[in-house]
Amino acid sequence: MSPQVGIIMGSDSDLNVMQAAADMLKTVGIPFELTVVSAHRTPMRMVNYATAAKERGLKVIIAGAGGAAHLPGMVASLTPLPVIGVPIKSSNSIDGWDSVLSILQMPNGIPVATVALNAAKNAGILAASILGAFDETLGQRVAAYKQQLETEVLNKVDKLKSEGWNNSFD
């Protein structure tokens, strides 16, 4: 099955964060591709990836980047597809705020959906939700996933009710 979501990152050092997006897409059964595309070190690769993405069958791109974090915005400027940016707290980052603001503060006309710092799982959920809006079966899988989250929380509520909690610092 050809990929519907492209997961790209500026460096292979971002894989430990971006893996969560891949795992989420696997959970709901969405085919994806994952690769490194650096806005600064491989600009022509980035241009080629972004401009050919729709033609190749992709429907959403998840782009993770740290530091200056130009990748999501530059890709969004080159493709008509929705782009979800994942700001990554990298080794050269200023507590991740530089990445968050670089992705979040896009100029009018070039939107990038932005998730929380290192929240690639949320990017996977958002991509699944976007695709699920047009695919009833996928939409049901996303709804089932969210129902599972609710069930897990309600089970914890019941456990607290039945077992109580201990607020001691022994």
Image (spheres, rainbow, N blue to C red):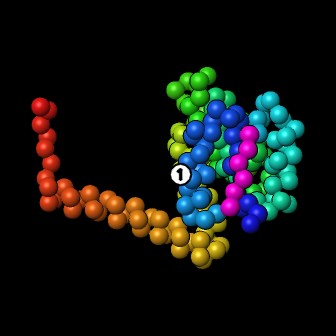
Write the residue at 73% across / 60% down: 3
Answer with left or right where residue 128 lies relative to residue 56: left
Q: Quadrant of residue 103?
A: top right
Write the residue at 12% across / 37% down: 168
Q: Which residue is mark 1?
A: 122
- Whether 8 is drawn above or below 14: the answer is below
Q: Is residue 33 magenta?
A: yes
**x, y percentage for residue 165?**
15, 48
Q: Is residue 32 magenta?
A: yes
User: Nearest the camera: 166 or 71?
Assistant: 166
**x, y percentage for residue 69?**
67, 34
Write the residue at 72% across / 61% down: 4
Q: Quadrant of residue 64?
A: top right
**x, y percentage for residue 145?**
47, 65
- Whether 125 is drawn above or below 87: the answer is below
Secondary structure mainly formed by the magenta segment: strand
User: Disc count in the image?
Assistant: 1
The residues colored magenta run 31-36
User: Circle 1 sits in a helix, a strand or a loop, which is it?
Assistant: helix
**Mark 1 Cα-neighbour bin, 10 Å: few <14, some 14–19, many ≥20:** some
Residue positioned most to the bottom: 136
Answer with left or right where residue 137 lies relative to residue 42: left
The amino acid pointed to by label 1 is Asn
Answer with left or right where residue 54 lies relative to residue 72: right
